[in-house]
Image (spheres, rainbow, N blue to C red):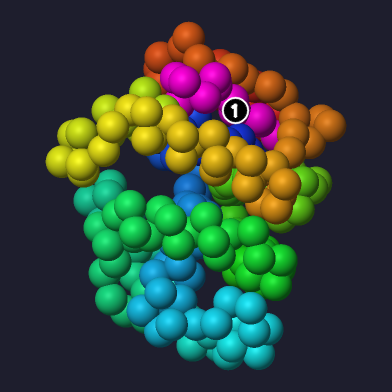
Amino acid sequence: MAFIVAIDGPAGTGKGTVTKIIAKDLGLVDIDTGAMYRCVALYSLRNQINLGNSEEIEKMFENIKIDLQKENDILKVYLNDEDVSSIIRTPEIDKQTTIVGPIQLIRRKMVDLMREAAKGKNVIMEGRDIGTAVFPNADVKIYLDAEAEERARRRYKENCQKHIDCTYEKVLEDMINRDKTDLTKGGLRRAEDAVLVDSTNLTIEEVVEEIEKIIKEKM
């Protein structure tokens, strides 16, 4: 029987970083659902998909193949055999992801892809609705949160390191708007049986330690 860890929470809480570390520490398979959504965003943008047309969305998923591969401990993301690891992390794709993410037909299609990717594996998966929609019977459910100002500060620092032109104020504004979309349309909510971990005043190492303790008690 596969062991499933679900980590949900808003953008900028460190879910991706924490998940990667825990996967390595505990020998779990890390499935980057955010990267999968970003691939859909990239494909829809490149191919000018009418996201208001269900037939076009259905056809889009018939033509999408997403592969996540670890190469020298680095996640490589392939969309139809093209390495898009860097392309999907740009502000343009950030914006498009916030558009495709809330669309219910896309979310249903993605749930199927995520479940298929996790089949028969001991998995740790992060996202917005992993513990509520994708794996409601997950062995461990974590809701990782942090104050919006702190999340914006982290994202601004990350953008500066990548030489992305932005201001803290704009990043905070985008973060607050993203939260509203995620909460109203994106499926973001804390499962009733999820353990809340607030990372506002914690280092990545402290968050990892706290979550690994919770997981080990269930393994």
Q: Residue furthest left?
A: 163
Of residue 102 and residue 195, the one placed in the foreground of this image is: 102
Q: Residue furthest right?
A: 192
- Amino acid at the residue labelled 1: Leu
> Does 76 lie within the magenta span?
no
> Does 146 lie within the magenta span?
yes
- In the picture, residue 165 is in which quadrant? top left
Q: Position of residue 69 (x, y in %)?
A: 35, 61
Residue position for label 1: 144
Q: Position of residue 146 (x, y in %)?
A: 55, 21
- First to last magenta residue range: 141-151
Q: Would you place residue 57 above or below residue 171 in this image?
A: below
Image point 34% across, 70% down: which residue? Answer: 78
Image point 48% across, 9% down: which residue? Answer: 201
Q: Quadrant of the C terminus?
A: top right
Q: Would you place residue 74 above or below residue 111 in this image?
A: above
Q: Position of residue 79 (x, y in %)?
A: 37, 74
- In the picture, residue 168 is in which quadrant? top left
Of residue 184 and residue 65, the one placed in the foreground of this image is: 184
Image point 78% across, 36% down: which residue? Answer: 191
Residue 157 visible (yes or no): yes
Q: On the rendered structure, is 198 left or right of 26? A: right
Of residue 191 and residue 149, the one placed in the foreground of this image is: 149
